[in-house]
Image: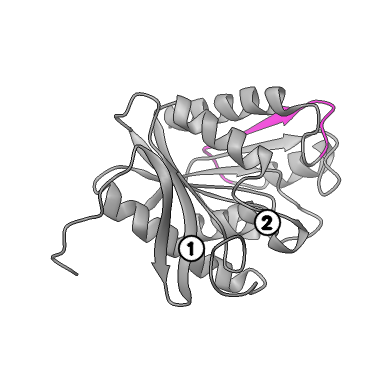
Amino acid sequence: MSDAAPPTIPAYGRIRIPVSHGALEAVLKESADGSPRAAAVLCHPHPLHGGTMNNNVVYRAGKAMNDAGLAVLRFNFRGVGQSTGTHAHGVGEEDDAVAALDYLQTLYPGLPLWMAGFSFGARVGLTVGARDDRVSKLLGVGLALKMFDYTVLATCRKPKAIVQASEDEYGGRAEIEVAVAAMPPPKALFIVDGATHLYPKHLDEFERAAAAAVGFLQTQ
């Protein structure tokens, strides 16, 4: 352990997180009231399909958490934006998520830590969050059940909330209901009716569902 002072917490700003391959480009946003009750890492969708930390769904999920009193760290996986490195098929991206979690812990020692993610980011983030003892709660958005393995959640007893589009191309209402039913409690599923995976024309409804999911997690 280093005796160096923790980095200064910016109210809002772009930061760089040191990692083995260089640095991750990230944005930290404080809670709306400036006194966060928890802090969350938020992971973005697939880098090879245009996913970045500036994705609309990721931004709205972060806003819902900020409004509920969480500090939120969004970051670009390796090879995205100004982050160094190259895409590593989810394995290296798990290391990036751990590095983001490490950084967040130095900023907010003693605060509960959450892990959240959208699509590929949910696969990476929730896998890391389920395994890491520092993470107390999990928020998954748009689980791409037809693309990725989320079975780690089937044995995870941490509180978890899932937000899913009813017409999601990678796992709609029927598929996500089966998947969530296999997860141990505490858990909650929030469906955005009529929406598809990227929530086009349904971002406001998505943000309300995300806020409800965060509210559920805060009661657990």
Please report whichever mark, 2 or 1, sits nearer to the chain's N-terminal start.
Answer: 1
Give the mark count: 2
Bin the neighbour count of mark 1 within 10 Å (Cα to Cα): few under 14, some 14-19, many 20 and up: many
* Residue at image coords 39%, 67%: 18
In the image, taking residue 158 as reference, residue 176 lies left or right, namely right
Q: Amino acid at mark 1?
A: Leu
> Magenta span has 11?
no
Does the rendering let one see residue 155? no
Instruction: Say if 35 sits above or below 116 in the image.
Output: above
In the image, taking residue 27 as reference, residue 120 lies left or right, namely right
Q: Which residues are magenta?
A: 184-196
Residue 27: x %, y % from top left:
47, 47
Q: For the residue labelled by badge 1, is the local secondary structure a helix, a strand or a loop?
A: strand
Bin the neighbour count of mark 2 within 10 Å (Cα to Cα): few under 14, some 14-19, many 20 and up: many
Q: Which residue is mark 2?
A: 120
How far apart, in angstroms, are the residues tagged by discs 2 and 1?
17 Å
- Label at residue 45: none
Q: Amino acid at mark 2?
A: Phe
- Label at residue 24: 1
